[in-house]
Image (cartoon, rainbow, N blue to C red):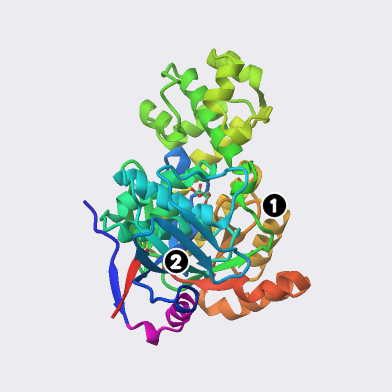
């Protein structure tokens, strides 16, 4: 049994952000908050698009988070406001079955996902009424997990408001599952690091069973996050789910080729486990079994001995029904290769010789190339930004998060940080007025932050 999220006692008036949030809350609802809760965003250092395949990832929490002020009542109604006026107020009396409209993702649906997750976990028929004001500092649609942080914060609030208790691991598992109500078939990385993060350390997150192990990052380097300023909202497009589906199909094709019961297996990691093979052997198997040309539905159905109807209902998700071609070879190659890079990154961090920094940088660069060329989850802006980061002094640079826009993460020798920031600013941000206007929140150094917590007034 792992620990529960911490409850931190703070003098609200000594913290500008909390004080401001409290004032807004009191003006809005005419009462004081009972408690506060926060959940951080994250930057993934390496291990992209492999969590939903069952492989370990290596993220750290960032300082930017979702912070909420909450009061509890017995009205059975949820009232939400966001200090960012872009997000409209929301009020609903909470039914037993909360519905989330996948075709029309609104900011508060992420909050409702968290509520629904806790409601279902405990079978709560009458939820406590809650009034909340939310203050988010994670740039949205930037690959830093602002939406999962909102889901995690909401689950924590709902648990607390309904006087329930859960471990961090259970909360992370519930949130990974309930965020899927939005329609994206995410893995569990974002929710896990949001709950399991600890200040000062990155984490290796393993799944089944969920476990987080400290990864000591090398001395003498800092990690810099830079936003390419192209927004990517993964719930509003099908890119992400197409990749999930391609990996699921590749799993079945590989299993079938090796005489395993393909109907039972859903994740590429399961094929490796069943075959008791190494990742190198899995990479060789991909080359042997799958061809680089995209697969048609008909070809897949023929190999798996299933009908086109079974293909649509069992393998595709709601927003991937129209996809006709599937790049199975490329996607599986990325996944097994990336899984191996995560393990190498971790072991280089653990052994820690001075030359390790070059090695870590190379792994990050290989990861970006694989995301760009095999997984096709980059975009021209991200590629340009990564290129500029490397030319500006980074030892390694790669896209982070789902991709198709959003942020890159770069590893930069500490002594070069000022010249690095200046060079990236000049080459990427200043030439474009829109980027220049976003620069302050789009280019910053990040240190491993702490996990989600309940905050009480001292
Ligand atoms: C999103 C998902 C994660 C993970 C990443 C890609 O952030 O929520 O589960 O799949 O994309 O690595």
Label 2 SS: strand
Residue identifier under label 1: 379
Residue identifier under label 2: 132
Question: From the viewer's perspective, is residue 333 above or below residue 80?
Answer: above
In the current view of this chain or complex, which residue is farthest to the left?
1
- Residue 76 visible, this angle: yes
- At horizontal 49% and vertical 67% (from top left) the residue drawn is 134
Give the magenta range. Answer: 11-25
Question: Viewer-proximal residue, 310 or 373?
Answer: 310
Question: Viewer-proximal residue, 79 or 445?
Answer: 79
Which corner quadrant holds the C terminus?
Answer: bottom left
Other residues around mark 2 within 10 Å, as few (<14) / some (14–19) / many (≥20): many
Mark closest to the chain's N terminus, 2 or 1: 2
- At horizontal 60% and vertical 20% (from top left) the residue drawn is 300
- Image spot of residue 195 (x, y percent): 36, 58
Which mark, by number, is residue 266?
A: none
Q: Is residue 133 left or right of residue 71?
A: right
Single out the mark in the foreground, 2 or 1.
2
């Amino acid at each position: 049994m792992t620990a529960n999220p911490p409850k931190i006692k703070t003098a609200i008036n000594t913290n500008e952000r909390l004080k401001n949030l409290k004032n807004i809350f009191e003006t809005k609802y005419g009462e004081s908050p009972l408690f506060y809760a926060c959940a951080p965003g994250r930057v993934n250092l390496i291990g992209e698009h492999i969590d939903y395949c069952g492989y370990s990832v290596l993220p750290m929490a960032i300082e930017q988070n979702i912070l909420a002020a909450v009061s509890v009542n017995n009205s059975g109604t949820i009232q939400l406001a966001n200090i960012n006026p872009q997000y409209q107020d929301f009020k609903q009396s909470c039914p037993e079955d909360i519905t989330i409209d996948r075709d029309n993702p609104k900011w508060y649906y992420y909050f409702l996902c968290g509520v629904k997750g806790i409601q279902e976990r405990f079978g709560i028929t009458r939820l406590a009424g809650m009034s909340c004001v939310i203050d988010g500092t994670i740039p949205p649609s930037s690959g830093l997990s602002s939406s999962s942080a909102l889901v995690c914060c909401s689950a924590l609030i709902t648990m607390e408001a309904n006087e329930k208790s859960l471990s961090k691991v259970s909360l992370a598992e519930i949130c990974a599952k309930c965020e899927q109500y939005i329609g994206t078939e995410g893995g569990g990385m974002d929710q896990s690091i949001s709950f399991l993060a600890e200040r000062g350390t990155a984490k290796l997150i393993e799944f089944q069973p969920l476990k987080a192990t400290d990864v000591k990052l090398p001395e003498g380097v800092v990690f810099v996050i830079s936003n390419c300023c192209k927004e990517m909202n993964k719930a509003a497009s099908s890119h992400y789910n197409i990749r999930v589906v391609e990996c699921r199909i590749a799993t079945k094709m590989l299993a079938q080729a090796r005489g395993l019961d393909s109907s039972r297996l859903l994740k590429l990691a399961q094929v490796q486990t069943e075959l008791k093979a190494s990742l190198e052997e899995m990479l060789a198997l991909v080359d042997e079994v799958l061809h680089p040309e995209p697969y048609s539905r008909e070809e897949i159905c023929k190999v798996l001995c299933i009908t086109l109807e079974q293909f649509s209902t069992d393998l595709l998700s709601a927003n991937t029904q129209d996809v006709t071609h599937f790049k199975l070879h490329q996607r599986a190659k990325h996944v097994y290769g990336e899984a191996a890079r995560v393990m190498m990154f971790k072991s280089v961090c653990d052994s820690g010789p001075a030359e390790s920094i070059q090695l870590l940088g190379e792994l990050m660069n290989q990861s970006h190339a694989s995301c760009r060329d095999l997984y096709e989850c980059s975009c021209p802006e991200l590629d340009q930004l990564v290129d500029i980061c490397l030319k500006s002094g980074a030892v390694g640079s790669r896209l982070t998060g789902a991709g198709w826009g959003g942020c890159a993460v770069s590893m930069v020798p500490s002594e070069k940080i000022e010249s690095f920031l200046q060079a990236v600013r000049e080459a990427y941000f200043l030439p474009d007025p829109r980027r220049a206007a976003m620069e302050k929140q789009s280019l910053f150094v990040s240190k491993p932050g702490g996990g989600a917590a309940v905050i009480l007034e001292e």
